[in-house]
Amino acid sequence: MAAAAAAAELALVKPISYKFGRPSAGARRGGASLVVRMSSAAPPLPPAAKTARPKKAPKNTQIKETLLTPRFYTTDFDEMESLFNTEINKNLNEAEFEALLNEFKTDYNQTHFVRNPEFKEAADKIQGPLRQIFVEFLERSCTAEFSGFLLYKELGRRLKKTNPVVAEIFSLMSRDEARHAGFLNKGLSDFNLALDLGFLTKARKYTFFKPKFIFYATYLSEKIGYWRYITIYRHLQANPEFQVYPIFKYFENWCQDENRHGDFFSALMKAQPQFLNDWKAKLWSRFFCLSVYVTMYLNDCQRTAFYEGIGLDTKEFDMHVIIETNRTTARIFPAVPDVENPEFKRKLDRMVEINEKLIAVGESQDLPLVKNLKKVPLIAALVSEILAAYLMPPLESGSVDFAEFEPQLVY
Ligand SMILES: [Fe+2]
Ligand SMILES: [Fe+2]
């Protein structure tokens, strides 16, 4: 959401520039989040990336950054360490985390991500405008998965001493995300492209979120990922004539990984009741839900050709995913937006219209100053629409399980 995400995220996001090679001191210390995205139609890569490209290797693609681009995140690892210190935090339910760890160790999908010749054959048949939009889908998905890999890997490393069980779960989740990102990147090779993930790791900006916000954001992104994958999977099972590329057949087991990741964050939040049980938590919960839903809706409405290409109605698909994610999220977040109120969708649709006008201004031949002047009222309209959606009466929610924790909070 060129501007929508801006409005929603600027309050939180403090981008930290990475120099080539090594993150800045500030970023290493603790706070940067990073967003990645690429498009094969984007401008040429900087020299560092070009020289690393072997001959005859698939063409590396480049990132075109927008506020709607999947992000790379970093956090305050020192604060994370104190949150997961069992000496300090008596709410950490060791038995629950041990059980979760065993689940992750089982590694249900160890042999799931195996490719076959169908992939390349199917990719060769995807031609015309759908081909470009398909590539973009693979790139964005790969970037989002890789973003999870980077964050979880670092958390696994940093929490090892403080809380080995939680640390190992993070490491095993990074294993899953690496697998997902790798599988998507192999999909790109079917289209003779590849994402240079090593280059991205070093060259992209990371966005910093405090641990509390990392929990809200990652919980939501795992659960929304689950609902997106399972919805596409079920739709294609029912309508196999739209099964244009075999990757979707893998989504059923794949989304179970995302579901488990989300459940882990749910357990983490329950162990940090201060992030769930006051009025600030309610405001932030609604804010994060709205940011995630609006971002997805505006993103997907710019890519209807992809969803139509696999037989889905973009807005119907998105509303289904938003409603299901919101119902799931209501089990743990103390408040969520009332997305089933028809007014919510009307507001999203108005945001799409405004965003389309913003994109048209951006793509026009006007001088930069003229473009900016034309954008101002549109951005104001978008912000006021988002604000109005935020101020709609929310649903009070929260976990039944969470109530079990409350007696422990009263010392
Ligand atoms: Fe994943
Ligand atoms: Fe995940």
Image: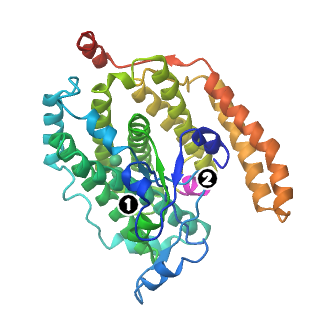
Q: Main secondary structure of the magenta part?
A: helix
| Pointer 2 residue | 304
The answer to whether residue 25 of the structure is visible from this angle is yes
Please, is residue 24 above or below residue 97 in the view? below
Whole-percent x, y for residue 403 in the image: 30, 13
Verify whether residue 306 appears in magenta.
yes
Crowd tier of the residue under label 2, counting other residues whose Cα lies within 10 Å: few below 14, some 14–19, many 20 or above: some
Q: Quadrant of residue 128?
A: bottom right
Numbered disc 1: secondary structure: helix
Amino acid at dot 1: Ile
Instruction: Where is residue 410? Give x, y as percent.
Output: 27, 9
Sequence order check, earlier mark of 1 and 2: 1
Query: Residue 138, percent across and down?
Result: 46, 62
242 left or right of 89 in image: right
Residue 247 numbered mark, or none: 1
Quadrant where the C terminus is found in the figure: top left
Three-letter residue code for mark 2: Thr
Label 1 neighbour load within 10 Å: few <14, some 14-19, many 20+ = some
Residue 370 falls inside the magenta stretch: no
Taking depth in this image into account, of 99 and 19 the one nearest to the observer is 19
The picture quadrant where one finds residue 163 is top left
Please indicate whether residue 85 sits to the left or right of residue 367 in the image: left
Judge whether residue 240 can be spotted in this image. Answer: no
Give the magenta-colored segment's residue range.
304-309
- Vertical side of 402 occupied by 319: above or below: below
The numbered mark at residue 364 is none
Q: Give the Cα separation between the discs numbered 1 and 2.
A: 19 Å
Secondary structure, mark 2, is helix
Q: Please tell me in which quadrant of the rendered image residue 240 appears.
A: bottom left
